[in-house]
Image: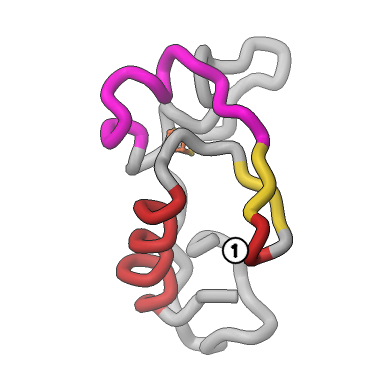
Amino acid sequence: LSSVPSLHGDADADLVPIKGNPPSLINLPSGCAFHPRCRYADRNGDRSRTDVPELRQVVERGHLVACHLPEAARQRIYRDEIAQVGVAR
Ligand code: SF4
């Protein structure tokens, strides 16, 4: 989310780029396709590299998520690292 411009956030806030390049869509990485570029992939041991995360509904926010991180960890990352830089949605 920090790499995407926001219509509602601080227009002067710096975007946070995602390292590396997008993967080939005909040769996706194993496990979570984002793991080579995800700064949080190591927080799950090897799970992000080996297991495709299941798409689950996040009830209280009305959207879907496919990530091995527990809900509390994702919320903590969003609160402490993403919303803090002024590009939160
Ligand atoms: S499962 Fe979540 S933490 Fe792991 S690589 Fe994918 S997006 Fe990152």
Identify the residue at image location x=53%, y=16%: 29
From the image, tell me which residue sits under label 1. 4
Q: Name the image quarter holding residue 35.
A: top left
Q: Is residue 61 on the magenta stretch?
A: no
Question: x, y percentage for residue 49?
Answer: 41, 18
Q: Secondary structure at mark 1?
A: loop
Identify the residue at image location x=64%, y=86%: 8
37 in relation to 24, above or below: below
Q: Is residue 47 on the magenta stretch?
A: yes
The amino acid on which the numbered mark 1 sits, given as a three-letter code, is: Val
Ligand 1 position by quadrant: top left
Identify the residue at image location x=35%, y=52%: 73
Relative to residue 79, is residue 57 drawn left or right? right
Relative to residue 43, is residue 47 drawn left or right? right
How many numbered marks are there? 1
10 Å neighbourhood of mark 1: few (<14), some, or many (≥20)? Answer: few
29 in relation to 16, above or below: above
Q: Nearer the viewer, residue 73 or 50?
A: 73
- Quadrant for the N terminus, please: bottom right
74 in relation to 30, above or below: below
- Quadrant for the C terminus, please: bottom right
Write the start and end of the magenta stretch as one range. 41-55
Question: x, y percentage for residue 11?
Answer: 56, 87
Question: x, y percentage for residue 25?
Answer: 70, 21
Q: Nearer the viewer, residue 63 or 85?
A: 63
Question: x, y percentage for residue 27?
Answer: 64, 11
Identify the residue at image location x=34%, y=62%: 76
